Image: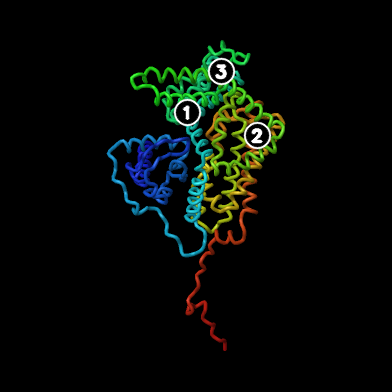
Amino acid sequence: MAPENKNRATAAAILPLVGGARNIDSVAHCMTRLRLGLKDRALVQDDALKALPAVLGVVEDDTYQIVLGPGTVAKVAPEFEALLAAEPAEDPGPGAAAPGTHAAGADTHTTAAELAARGSDLRAARKARNATPVKLALRRIANIFVPLIPALIGCGIIAGLNGLLVNLGWLTGLTPSLAAIASGFMALIAVFVGFNTAKEFGGTPVLGGAVASIIVFAGVAKVTVFGQTLAPGQGGVLGALGAALLAVYVEKWCRRWVPESLDVLVTPTLTVLVSGLVTLYGLMFVAGEVATGIGHGANWLLDHTGVFAGLVLGGLFLPLVMLGLHQALIPIHTTLIEQQGYTVLLPILAMAGAGQVGCAVAVYLRARHNESLRTTIKSALPAGFLGVGEPLIYGVSLPLGRPFVTACAGGAAGGAFVGLFSMLGDKVGSTAIGPSGWALFPLLQGNHGLATTVAIYAGGLATGYAVGFLATYYFGFTRDSLAALNPAPATPTAPPDHPEHTPAPARA
């Protein structure tokens, strides 16, 4: 089957299982997930959806998120949108049969389906807990930065390639062009942040971009604030976010009070003028100080407490994901990339995925008689190695309980490994956010050469795999939980009249 037909078939298979075209309010996608806004959650056939070969898992948040994996989701999403643009299909009833579902067995042994059901319950509980003002705000911040990730990745890989060529002294005529291609987006990232901020908070996107563009305009070097001359880019993405958010509030105020006959002239003018002046004479300076503090703080933390910091960050990242608090790190990563060219936090946080993979391998070996669970792990492990952890988290470790803790132990060990080398002066960073696991290798950058950086990151992954595996294998199960995972194989018994049970004739 041609690739485009395969992607179209995947989209066509998903659509009826989420309630059809009439049940879809919105469609978006990030690095790994197709994100759907649903009108009626009850119309979704979860078991049938998870049974599709292309689906790695599902996550419920403010949207219904179908995990398809990096690359695949970017190809399936346009096909899905094309199906929605066509004649809306009839909605299936909530009682429609869900192919691929498995009837619950009569025994008490734990199956993959039961673990998936527990994972769904945990997702639902997490969704309820996450409906707080702080977490909703963090989610909106994530919505601003997630659409920028593909450009960050592309430019990050080109920057890494250019750095390699410069160090080797190859293609010296081409490297200036590669530098321009890699740096152009980062030089204007504030504009994109401003555009997305205004869009997310209900303003006019281009006005948010216009106000944020002031931050990167070279002419700000002629403006003096608090006795200091402003520098182009001062405040970075944090200043852009604040400027665009202010622009949204000014615009909404104008829409309420400016007469309709003057709205088209007065509202955009006042929005840009008021927000621009506040940005120049306040936000840029304040955001610049905050951004500088973030950079110094991250470097100090890893330089002086690298092992401890890595242990904590690597060990707590999976719980942070569960609580939705990891989204607060996105602006921090972006600020570090903007300042230093790479974020030193992401490679440490990526160790959580390594612990998760090691944990899953241990569960696979310990559950040697549980074919349904072993099949789930085999299908999810490749994605886990590439940094897509949701199928393993919600389908394996979290529903089992104790293995989730041992997976965190693996992440803590891997984070401590990378943090140790940071204390020794060898920093490991990523030029973009989004990928993890093996997918992060092309984006690695450090202060002591690519070979050293890759070796340290690979050593961290290996440590996370090993500790996650050993901790889970030896401490991840109680005797009862292990018995529940391994149904005893049926032993055939011969009928009473079988020759093996017939007494031998007495000898004369």
Kindly state the secondary structure of the residue where label 2 is placed: helix
Q: Indicate the amino acid at tag 2.
A: Ile
Quarter of the figure that contains the C terminus: bottom right
* Cα distance in 3D space between marks 1 and 3: 21 Å
Q: Residue furthest left?
A: 87
Which residue does the image show at 39% across and 47% down from the upper left?
A: 41
On residue 456, the disc is 2
* Front-lying residue, 131 or 104: 131
Check disc 1 and report the residue beneath it: 197
Q: Is residue 494 left or right of residue 41?
A: right
Place of residue 378 in the rendered image (x, y in percent of width and height, measured from the top left) = 51, 48
Which residue does the image show at 47% across and 33% down from the upper left?
A: 143
Q: Indicate the amino acid at tag 3.
A: Tyr
Q: Is residue 452 visible?
A: no
Q: What number of labels is visible?
A: 3
Note whether 255 is above or below 37 in the view shown: above
Place of residue 210 in the rendered image (x, y in percent of width and height, measured from the top left) = 46, 19
Kindly state the secondary structure of the residue where label 1 is placed: helix
Note whether 396 is above or below 328 in the view shown: below
On residue 281, the disc is 3
* Front-lying residue, 257 or 292: 257
